[in-house]
Image (cartoon, grey):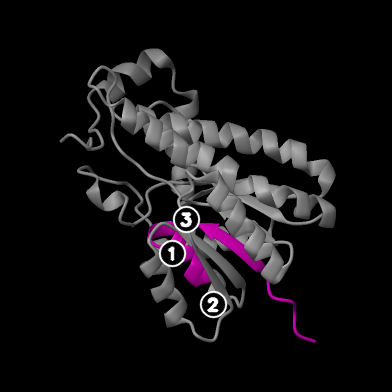
Amino acid sequence: MNAVPLKVFITGASSGIGLALAEEYVNRGAVLGLVARRAESLAAFAARHPEAFISIYPADVRDPDALADAARRFIAEHGAADIVIANAGISQGALTGHGELDTFRAVMEVNYFGMVATFEPFIASMTAARRGTLVGIASVAGVRGLPGSGAYSASKSAAAKFLEALRVEMRPQGVAVVTIAPGYVRSEMTAHNPYRMPFLMDADRFAAKTADAIARKVRYATFPWQMRVVGMLLHVLPRWLYDPLFERAPRKPRPTQ
């Protein structure tokens, strides 16, 4: 008897980690619902996999109404989702006092509020079914406030804390919550970093390990594993040592540069 295919909904699916996750799950025979702003990229992905069950929903995660509509359509077409992955994210350097409030706002809207808005319309059907897994893509960059990346670090820290709270809230409802905290993953996002990225991981390998972790419903996972050690060390590094060490660290490019 054939297993029932997983129903997986992914945001930010047109490039980078999201695209790699879509490829991984389509190879595992999943039914996919894919969200991204670039409709042509989603259509091209679906065209490359004519044998797969893929629904595409061009939308911006900063638009909660568009996300809710995509979720309703996915549930109507396929039933309650098994896995919802809030992956959409942006990464930009920003400095306070340099007129970059729009950057701070945009990063938080996509990386944090977009995650909340992605999960919101799936909660009712998942709790009714008493099953399902909500997955949020956080980051090792959220462990400490990285100079020059205050917007990004703050958004990923907010995401991680939200996911932890949600995990406990959903536990009595039979719904799992998984936090994935990537280190450096080869993608369009990291291609612009003008500094060395230790333990850089290919996106397809990251996606395979992430899908395995989701299947096991782990509470928190970091890939590559070496960056989990880095994250743990960062967490316990005293402020008197952290400050002078990171004061001279290379910084992420800003939109104005």
Q: Quarter of the image holding residue 210?
A: bottom right
Asked if disc 3 and disc 2 are in contact, CB closer than 8 Å, the reply is no
Residue that appears at 79% across and 56% down: 131
What type is the residue that disc 3 sits on?
Ala
Comes first in the chain, label 1 or label 3 = 1
Q: Viewer-nearest of labels 1 and 3?
A: 3
Residue 229 visible to an observer of this rendering: no
Q: Mark 2 or mark 1, which has the lower sequence index?
A: 1
x then y, percent, for residue 140: 45, 39
Cα separation between marks 1 and 3: 15 Å
Left or right: 118 as drawn, with respect to 109: right
Identity, as a three-letter code, of the amino acid under mark 2: Asn
Q: Residue at x 33, y 17 (%)?
A: 243
Q: Residues within 10 Å of mark 1 (few under 14, many from 20)?
A: many
Seen at 26% across and 37% down, the residue is 252
Q: Secondary structure at mark 3?
A: loop
Image coordinates of residue 208 in percent, x first then y, are: 52, 65
At mark 1, the secondary structure is: helix
Please give the range of residues in magenta.
1-24
- Amino acid type, mark 1: Leu
**Pair 3/2: label in front:** 3
Q: To which residue does mark 2 refer?
A: 27
Answer above or below: position of 172 versus 187: above
Mark 1 highlights which residue?
Answer: 19
Q: Residues within 10 Å of mark 3 (few under 14, many from 20)?
A: many
Residue 103 seen anywhere in this rendered image of the structure? yes
Front disc: 2 or 1: 1
